[in-house]
């Protein structure tokens, strides 16, 4: 899933470079506004047909945003702050890596403009743009933690965590951990049932008691997991 997001997000980086080149080249610069109008019409159409979850909608929205900044002067545009908002949005729509690459791309294409008017102001602007990178990581993490605390989402595993072994890393995933715990208890029940079938009646009764106990443990494990992830206590 993460790899797919990165692949789709990489399209935004190429789109940014392509639109920048298109809007600054003398041969194509005059058509930038026309392209903006076309992108805007497509964006409205996608909104009317409720296609907001598709990558095409995101790419079209980015086209409108980038061309709006480009038509009004890119580095000197009064809409320049839209790029900050775009960088933050990309960290939620894709991954923080895509957001970081987007900011890095903007810095690279804007560096030649440093000193055109006020070198100090231009440098401070680029620094502020770079500071968006740690900000996107922070906002994304805080948002996810907030939603997890509200039981709106379940974070399966923590990013950047360090594990002592491969087994610890695998079991850090909450679904994998609960599945392993339940699988162990269910296998115990299976073995007890097999033994109960082979042994005498009295021994079988003892095994049935053990089976009931292990089954209850499995149910309690499942109940705790469900309550922890949903935030709702189930009626017994």
Image (spheres, rainbow, N blue to C red):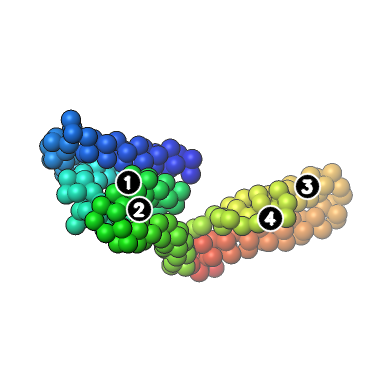
Q: 46 left or right of 102?
A: left
When the figure is inspected, residue 47 is found, relative to residue 129, above or below; the finding is above
Q: 158 left or right of 34?
A: right
Q: Kindly tell me whether residue 2 is visible in this rendering.
A: yes
Q: Residue at x 40, y 56 (%)?
A: 130
**Mark earlier in primary sequence (2, 3):** 2
Q: Secondary structure at mark 2?
A: helix
Residue named by callout 1: 112
* Mark 2 to mark 3 CA distance (whole Å): 55 Å
Q: Residue at x 41, y 60 (%)?
A: 131
Q: Position of residue 41 (x, y in %)?
A: 14, 40
Q: Position of residue 37 (x, y in %)?
A: 13, 40
* Mark 4 to mark 1 CA distance (whole Å): 44 Å
When the figure is inspected, residue 138 is found, relative to residue 10, above or below; the finding is below
Q: Are marks 4 and 1 in contact (CB under 8 Å)?
A: no
Relative depth, front residue between 54 and 179: 54
Q: Secondary structure at mark 3?
A: helix
Q: Nearer the viewer, mark 4 or mark 1?
A: 1
Q: Position of residue 71 (x, y in %)?
A: 17, 45
* Mark 3 to mark 1 CA distance (whole Å): 72 Å
Residue named by callout 2: 87
Q: 96 left or right of 18?
A: right
Q: Nearer the viewer, mark 3 or mark 1?
A: 1
Residue named by callout 3: 191
* Mark 1 to mark 2 CA distance (whole Å): 21 Å
Badge 2 crowding class, 10 Å Cα cut-off, few under 14, some 14 to 19, many 20 or more, is: many
Residue named by callout 4: 163
Q: 201 left or right of 73?
A: right
Q: Nearer the viewer, mark 2 or mark 3?
A: 2
**Mark earlier in primary sequence (4, 3):** 4
């Amino acid at each position: 899933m993460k790899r797919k997001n990165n692949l789709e997000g990489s399209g935004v980086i190429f789109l940014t470079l392509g639109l920048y080149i298109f809007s600054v080249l003398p041969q194509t610069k005059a058509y930038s506004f026309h392209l903006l109008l076309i992108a805007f019409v497509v964006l409205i159409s996608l909104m009317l047909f409720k296609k907001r979850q598709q990558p095409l909608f995101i790419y079209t929205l980015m086209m409108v945003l980038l061309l709006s900044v480009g038509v009004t002067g890119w580095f000197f545009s009064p809409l320049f702050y839209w790029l900050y908002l775009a960088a933050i949005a990309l960290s939620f729509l894709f991954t923080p890596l895509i957001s970081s690459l987007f900011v890095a791309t903007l810095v690279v294409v804007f560096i030649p403009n440093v000193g055109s008017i006020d070198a100090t102001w231009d440098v401070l602007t680029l620094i502020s743009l770079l500071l968006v990178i740690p900000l996107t990581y922070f906002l994304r993490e805080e948002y996810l933690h907030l939603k997890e605390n509200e039981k709106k989402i379940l974070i399966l595993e923590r990013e950047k965590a360090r594990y002592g072994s491969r087994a610890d890393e695998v079991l850090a995933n909450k679904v994998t951990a609960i599945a392993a715990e339940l699988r162990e208890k269910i296998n115990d029940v299976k073995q007890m049932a097999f033994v109960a079938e082979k042994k005498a009646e009295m021994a079988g009764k003892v095994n049935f008691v053990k089976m009931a106990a292990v089954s209850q443990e499995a149910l309690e494990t499942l109940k705790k997991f469900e309550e922890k992830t949903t935030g709702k206590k189930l009626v017994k």
